[in-house]
Image (tube, helix red, strand yellow):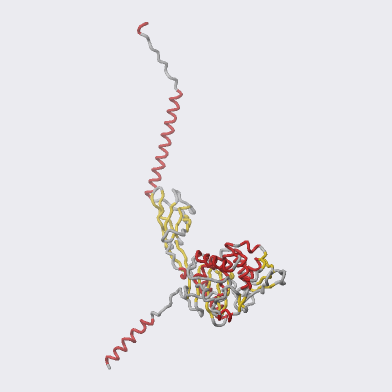
Amino acid sequence: MRTFFLLCRFFICLAPFFLSFPLYADPHTVLTKGIAAAVVHADSGAILKEKNLDHKIFPASMTKIATALLILRQYPDVLTRFITTRREPLTSITPQAKQQSGYRSPPHWLETDGMTIQLKVKEEVSGWDLFHALLISSANDAANVLADACCQSVSAFMRQLNEFLRELGCQNTHFNSPHGLHHPDHYTTARDLSLIMKEALKEPLFRQVIHTASYTMEATNLSPERVLSSTNKLLSSSSTYFYPPCLGGKTGTTKSAGKNIIFAAEKNNRSIIVVAAGYFGPAAQLYQDAIALCEDLFNEQLLRCFLIPPASHYPVPTRFGTVTAPVAQGIYYDFYPSEGDPLLTLSLEPNKISFPIRKGDLLGHWILSTPTGENQHSIPFLAESDILPTLKQRILLMSLRILTTYRTYVLILLFVWIYRRKKQPRATKTFSNPFFS
């Protein structure tokens, strides 16, 4: 019994020690209600937060970002002309028949209950309007018609799209329709989706269209005007989930994929791409998580790393030895924890300077660089006050001035002597001939 109580006391004493070291999740891992998520730096592509980054997911209509990107990169002329729709790209099938066939029907066929703008065969519609319908109201028929107009068939467009995505660096993506209606062989990952979005954001027309909340298509030969409204609730000022930092993006919803969204946002001089995928509950869960992922990054506090502490003095080489210059504010760089410490190194490229050194004189440039020497940043190093020479340097300066003065004096005397020599007349010498003397 005594041994039992001793053991109890031992573990009770150790309990605070264990409790002081909780098990934290990976700081880059996020807890969302969806299957997968990613928060990516929009410029560098660095992964800032993630969940199941390389887990295979069904993208649904987020596929349309890839479709839009290929059109902008390789078929931009399609957007400037009118397209007459053909029957084959508008062929549809019920979801039940599609599933019962074992998905043996052409994967790009439309589904009767899917999102469309009800295009009709032989309707003449502008490519620009179709492009808006593709990205704003997520029209599946617009996706097929654009793909068909680019490559004369949707299947040819898809072959080219998959090759294009492989060249882009997507390693776990295969698409077999331009719209994203469910098919077992139509998949991607949060990582690949963020890469596609990063590339698409380089296109000004893409950024313009995805930021549009409402658009009116022109009347055609077979239909009156169509008013398109964005499926992205983050863009709608009347929505509960209106989020001003959102630059635009794309939603995607099917029974198999669940609810999904990918979008770009910008705030506090930070630009990010957010992917939230695989939500099978209310849409509120998707949008709440999407906004929370953004705010978590945008509210992140900068960390500061000093390479030279404040109130330091730094040696600066001159023609007459080294002087110490004050660096009152220090030299530092800031970084966000989610982006990681860039581990910058510091070096000084000194300027050719001599005395007197006055306040504001350029002493050189601080060079901040990565460990590999890339991404260099140059900061001017200015004298914060007048810098006086040391006693030794004053003696050297005085000696140099005396030497310079003496050398100048000698050169002047030499010049005068040479000048006077040239002015003196030369004596005429006569020679006598002994034979005639």
**How many discs appear?**
0
Report whether residue 291 is seen.
no
Percent position (x, y) of residue 116?
64, 75
Percent position (x, y) of residue 337?
46, 70
Q: Residue furthest left?
A: 2
- Rendering quarter of residue 309: bottom left
Seen in the image, is 85 located left or right of residue 181?
right
Seen in the image, is 339 located left or right of residue 113?
left
Q: Front-most of 18 and 101? A: 101
Can you say whether 2 is above or below 315 in the image? below
Seen in the image, is 91 located left or right of residue 385?
right
Percent position (x, y) of residue 85?
66, 69
Seen in the image, is 16 located left or right of residue 270?
left
Residue located 40% across and 40% down the image? 402
Percent position (x, y) of residue 275?
53, 73
Q: In which quarter of the image is the N terminus?
A: bottom left
- Rendering quarter of residue 229: bottom right
- Rendering quarter of residue 283: bottom right
Report whether residue 337 is seen.
yes
Q: Quadrant of the C terminus?
A: top left
Residue located 48% across and 70% down the image? 172
Q: Residue furthest bottom?
A: 1
Q: Front-most of 353 and 40? A: 40
